[in-house]
Image (spheres, grey):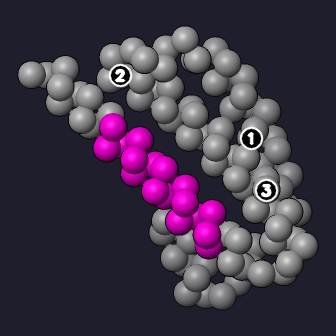
């Protein structure tokens, strides 16, 4: 995500807002179903919690993509895409850090 955001920043190309919104909405529906199935495992061991966090992050990602697509379509600016990419990269890194820390505690 971060790499793609950097690429967009360097090339100056704005994404197709309505296209990414359509894919985002499709992804939200699919990820909502998966998240509903995994919700009860969100406090499990590192392996199970990792699956939950990845699903949650996918849901957040697709919702952000859908919302960002609307903003890009309305404004014609690439900045909403760049900002969303940076925020999503931070969320993914935070989740990865949390899983690594939990796994280390479980190994001790």
Question: Callout 2: 10 Å neighbours few (<14), some, many (20+)?
Answer: few
The disc, 2 or 1, on the residue closer to the chain's N-terminal end is: 1
Question: Callout 1: 10 Å neighbours few (<14), some, many (20+)?
Answer: some
Q: Magenta span has 91? A: yes
Find residue 12 and report its horizontal and vertical position in percent.
66, 88
| Gap in angstroms between the C-alphas marked 3 and 1 | 12 Å
Question: Callout 3: 10 Å neighbours few (<14), some, many (20+)?
Answer: many
In this view, which residue lies farthest toward the left? 108
Disc number for residue 47 = 2
Find residue 83 and report its horizontal and vertical position in percent.
61, 69
Considering the whole magenta stretch, tell me its main secondary structure: helix
Mark in front: 3 vs 1? 3
Residue annotated with mark 1 = 27
Q: Residue at x 63, y 48 (%)?
A: 61
Report if residue 16 is visible in the image: no
Residues 23 and 81: in front is: 81
Q: Magenta span has 53? A: no
Disc number for residue 67 = 3
The relative height of residue 44 versus residue 3 in the rendered view (above or below) is: above
């Amino acid at each position: 995500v971060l790499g793609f955001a950097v690429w967009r920043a360097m090339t100056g190309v704005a994404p197709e807002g309505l296209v990414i919104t359509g894919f985002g909405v499709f992804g939200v529906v699919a990820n909502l179903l998966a998240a509903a199935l995994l919700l009860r495992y969100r406090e499990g061991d590192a392996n199970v919690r990792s699956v939950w966090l990845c699903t949650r992050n996918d849901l957040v990602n697709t919702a952000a993509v859908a919302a960002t697509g609307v903003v890009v379509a309305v404004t014609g600016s690439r900045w909403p895409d760049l900002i969303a990419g940076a925020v999503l990269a931070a969320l993914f890194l935070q989740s990865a850090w949390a899983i690594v820390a939990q796994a280390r505690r479980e190994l001790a």
